[in-house]
Amino acid sequence: MPETTPILLTLPRDGAKKIGSVGMPVSDAEVKLVDPGSGEDYVL
């Protein structure tokens, strides 16, 4: 659900930040990345 993205992922306040990262999921959230071109799951 794109409309919930701002509250599903968050970057840490302190500590290292990784360029290009979308952050870590909040507790009890599951995240799946999908290739918009093919519709296939994006495997990390």
Image: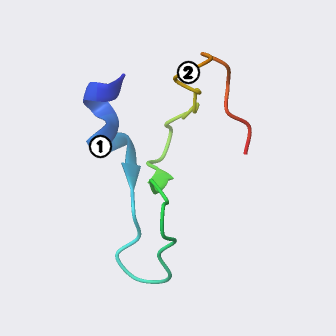
- Where's residue 7, x and y in %? 29, 43
Quadrant in which the C terminus appears: top right
Q: Are marks 1 and 2 in contact (CB under 8 Å)?
A: no
- Where's residue 29, x and y in %? 49, 36
The Cα–Cα distance between marks 1 and 2, rounded to whole angstroms, is 25 Å
Residue at (39% x, 64% y) in the render: 11
Task: Specify the label residue 16 is tagged with.
Answer: none
The kind of secondary structure element at disc 1 is helix
Horizontal arrangement in the rendering, residue 43 relative to residue 17 (left or right): right
- Which is more toward the observer, 29 or 24? 24
Q: Count how many numbered circles sit on residues in the image.
A: 2
Quadrant in which the N terminus appears: top left
> Residue lying furthest right in this view?
43
> Residue lying furthest bottom in this view?
15
Residue marked by disc 2: 37
For badge 2, the amino acid type reads Gly
* Crowd rating for badge 1 (residues with CA inside 10 Å; few <14, some 14–19, many 20+): few
For badge 1, the amino acid type reads Ile
- Which is more toward the observer, 17 or 15? 17
Residue at (41% x, 70% y) in the render: 12
> Residue lying furthest top in this view?
39
On screen, residue 13 above or below 42 = below
- Where's residue 40, x and y in %? 67, 19
Horizontal arrangement in the rendering, residue 21 relative to residue 3 (left or right): right
Residue at (52% x, 71% y) in the render: 18
Residue marked by disc 1: 7
User: Which of the 4 image quarters holds residue 10?
Assistant: bottom left
On screen, residue 40 above or below 4 = above
* Crowd rating for badge 2 (residues with CA inside 10 Å; few <14, some 14–19, many 20+): few
